[in-house]
Image (cartoon, rainbow, N blue to C red):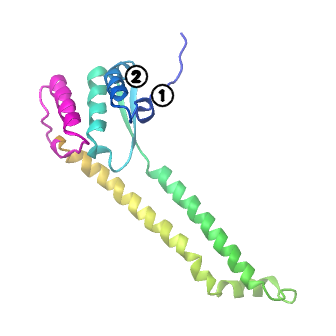
Amino acid sequence: QFHTDMCFLDVVSINQADPELMGRGIYGLGGFLAVSSELRILWSRPYLTRLWCIFEMAAFRKANPTGKIILKPLFLETFVVCAVFCLNIWLVIDEIRMQVLFMGDASDMDQTSAMVQGTFNPLSFLSLIPVIWCFHQCRRLFREKLEVVDNLKNFELAKVSCRTAEDREFIYHGIQMWYGSTYSSK
């Protein structure tokens, strides 16, 4: 049997500009979800605030009751991007600091005294800014991680936002047909 992994990325696969094409894509979504073995969600903070995201999860569960729903938070990826960015900024600032330090004649300075002078250079404090920013981002990401768990525990469909009243009506109608109501318990 020939097997290949495929990915249906909704934001790319469903036209977001043309209402007619968007409608056709939405009605075709069930076919993709029915043959999918899993729904992998790249989780970010606003995910549970978007009614279309909730609709996709509900549609997947209805079309594929035994399929896996995998929530993949983007915390680690976001942290790595922040850390790499901060490291690069720190290296640039440190290079500028070293250039300023050695602007004079460095031939009579040994390596130890150059390091000591470099440590107490006023630009040393400037190089701490990216490090402080990186720590701040880490704290923000850990706070978001806790919010995700809380948002899942306290989810209410009525509080989820939608761009248009027509979309909300369409989604509520679908969920009501599939599950009997739009009631969501805590």
Instruction: For the residues labelled 2 and 1, say whether their Cβ atoms are less than 8 Å apart.
Output: no
Instruction: Give the number of the disc on residue 61.
Output: none
Q: Which residue is mark 2?
A: 36
**Relative depth, front residue between 161 and 45:** 161
Viewer-side label of 2, 1? 1
| Rendering coords of residue 33 (x, y %) | 36, 23
Q: Residue 38 is drawn in which quadrant?
A: top left
SS at mark 1? Answer: loop
| Rendering coords of residue 23 (x, y %) | 32, 26
Query: If the image is split into quadrants, where does the C terminus sit?
Result: top left
In the rendered image, the vertical position of residue 130 relative to residue 148, given as above or below: below
Q: Which residue is mark 1?
A: 7
Name the side, left or right, on which 91 lies relative to 72. Answer: right
Crowding around mark 1 (Cα neighbors within 10 Å: few <14, some 14 to 19, many 20+) is few
| Rendering coords of residue 46 (x, y %) | 32, 49
CA–CA distance in space, label 2 to label 1: 9 Å
At label 1, which amino acid type do we have?
Cys
**Relative depth, front residue between 63 and 150:** 63
Residue 39 lies within the magenta run:
no
Kindly identify the residue that appears in the image at 12 percent across and 30 percent down.
181
Residue, far top: 1
Magenta residues, start to end: 158-186
| Rendering coords of residue 89 (x, y %) | 60, 67
At label 2, which amino acid type do we have?
Ser
Residue 173 lies within the magenta run:
yes
In the rendered image, the vertical position of residue 115 relative to residue 149, given as above or below: below
- Between discs 2 and 1, the one toward the N terminus: 1
In the rendered image, the vertical position of residue 4 relative to residue 16, given as above or below: above
Crowding around mark 2 (Cα neighbors within 10 Å: few <14, some 14 to 19, many 20+) is some
